[in-house]
Image (cartoon, coloured by chain):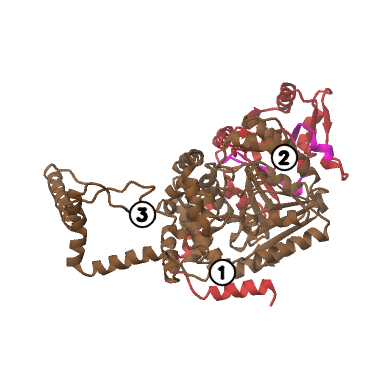
Chain colours: A brown, B red
Amino acid sequence: MNLRASSTRQYIRTALKNDNLRQAVNKATQTALQKRLAIVEQTPNWEDLRLRAHSIKQNVIEHLDEYLERFEKKCGENGIHVHWATDAEEARTIIKKIVRQNNVASIVKSKSLTTEEIHLNPFLTNLGVETLETDLGEYIVQLLDQTPSHLTAPALHLTRQDVGRIFQQKLGVDYTENPHELLQIARKKLRQKFLQADMGISGVNFAIASSGAFVVIENEANARLSMGLPRIHLAVMGIEKLIPTFQDLPLFLKLLPPSATGQKQTVYVNIIGGAQYDVLGEGPEQVHIVLLDNGRSKIAADVELRETLFCIRCGACLNVCPIYQQVGGHAYGWIYMGPIGATLIPQFLGLHEGRFAPFLSSLCGACHEICPMRIRIPHHLLKLRNQVVEAGFSKKGEKSVFKLWAFLAQHPVLYRLTTWLPGKIQIIYRRPFPAPGYWRKRALGLFDSRGFRRRFLDEQKQRKRRANIDQQHGMTT
Amino acid sequence: MNSRDKILSEIRSARQNPSLSATAFESINTAGEKAADKPPKNLPAMVQQFQKELQIVAGEFYLADTEAKAVDIIANCLKQEGFSRLMTSGTPGAERLAKRLNAAFTILSPPADQERKSYFADIPVALVDVDWAIAETGALVIHTRGAKSTFPYFLPQCLIALVRSSQLLADNQELFDTIEDKDAQNTMMITGPSRTADIEKILILGAHGPRRLLVIFMENE
């Protein structure tokens, strides 16, 4: 299934009609938020940790060339093969070459958004290489030919009944909706594949510049199995994933798991710094890493928007976002979704293709509050909205409304009249005004007969009166 | 220009513009926790914390003051689960304890040949040594390059790990401040049995790795 960011309006309409989806998303996001909060409350210096992590990432992005060169050199010393890919196509070509040179017939993959970004699965399948996702959620969405609907919980939009039916149809097993039994089915199917696979593919959570090693965190052990069993391991990594040293890793390990899944630490933290076959007689004989740019260096050129590269893909901003909670991940039309996705979509796919994304936000600021990297997401969304409008990709109707508003705002008498008149009309016509498009899905209220100016002044007066009363009673706010 | 140079030059030109909100990196970074500022180790408190954190993540904690007691705990677990075969990590501590087990159990050490993968694939339980344990998170840390085999740590349904009091560290910061980079770069940390919550956020233990993790904490070396 190929999603398109420019078709987001259509996806949203479908999503809004789907009550099951909304219930599933709500349940999952609320659970994650509660668990996160329990851990954050136990961490007294949480805000300091966010500040430190932000400044470390800032330093990395502003000296990215130096860190990348250092990482490449250290990887070389550790025997890791480093490949550079300017875009998705080049990354796929590199991977194809490695696959062909080593006669790879089957691949086990652990969850990686970066490989989704380069559409690796369909590419490898077309090459005739069996490519299986092994994270349970990813395995389920792969069977359905879908993409993940959440950064860390790929099958969040599906119920256990859905999964039971998918397994029955695609794997030919008896129907069950018992999650334990469903997991056992997947474990059994995939264990055999792990043992036979020629190559394991993973993403990278953090790469250590000073040491030439990379870190993959997970809970299921599927990443461990795909890194430890096949004879070749390949990791695809966005160039922004670097951190300076191992001594910085504990900080990021403290921030990521609580924000992502509400855990203090994930079950597995896998650190790979080269092939081990020569020493252990097991595990990969070759380790490859593909450093993917795919537009990241362009993002780094904008002094403000480069902050969006600090993202560690925890998904906390999705969980807390009122828009995401209503429409789910697929509505955004790309593999990065939610508030951070809304900033990445126009930057990666271009302003025209991604013209709707920055508007999928209420700008309430919850995403900034929760972001472990302190990325000012609402600020960046506004900047991108501005760019979309400047480029002439905004809706004409919307533009004329704002033009009209700007004109009125410059003419106080007219402004007063236009905000006063609708209220007066509705003293006689006591129904909401027709507003095509907007009207169908939303309840539109009646205008206040006082008009905006009068109402604003009245409320100010009331507030003052309340404050005076409070003062008389010795209450301070 | 090859892709490497293209990407690097693109980044170099992007670097010309310094961030508007530039924070003083050095000052914040060095203001972080330093190992030297920490109070001296309080081992009993650390053991208690380790136990608590391990149990939160559904791991089982057993204290053993003698090797005989540790052997009993292992034998009990094997009987309880109905396991007759046990694999070890091949490291000295695990090997020594496995040898003291009743002859009713078959003990398998990692073979040196290529068949290790299939040899170990169906063994339900493993007895392993670890290199460090972390009190703050309940994690076990294994230096994979120093191991005989990594398979026993993630292939079986049930993992029994031996931790010695000298291996207990306060937190991840102490771990990465203590160990050399070349050791850190091939490590695996395990915090509880493997798990998934991918179906309706329902937590199920034993995803692709162990569903049970027992830690035997050896008080005396």
| Residue at x-position 21% and y-position 49% | A429
Which amino acid is tagged 1? His
Q: Is residue A176 magenta?
A: no
User: Chain ID for label 3?
Assistant: A
Give the Cα distance between marks 1 and 3.
Answer: 51 Å
- At mark 1, the secondary structure is loop
Q: Residue furthest left?
A: A472
Dot 3: few (<14), some (14–19), or many (≥20) neighbours within 10 Å?
Answer: few
Asked whether, in this view, residue B15 is left or right of residue A166, the answer is: left
| Residue at x-position 77% and y-position 41% | B151
User: Chain ID for label 1?
Assistant: A
Specify start and end residues of the magenta stretch as a single range.
B118-147
Q: Which mark is residue A63?
A: 1
Vertical placement of A14 versus A401: above or below? above
Q: Which mark is residue A436?
A: 3
- For the residue pair A365 and B47, the one nearer the viewer reads as A365
Q: Is residue B137 magenta?
A: yes
Vertical placement of A74 versus A217: above or below? below
Q: Residue furthest right?
A: B113
| Image location of residue A9, percent across then percent down | 48, 55
| Residue at x-position 83% and y-position 31% | B107
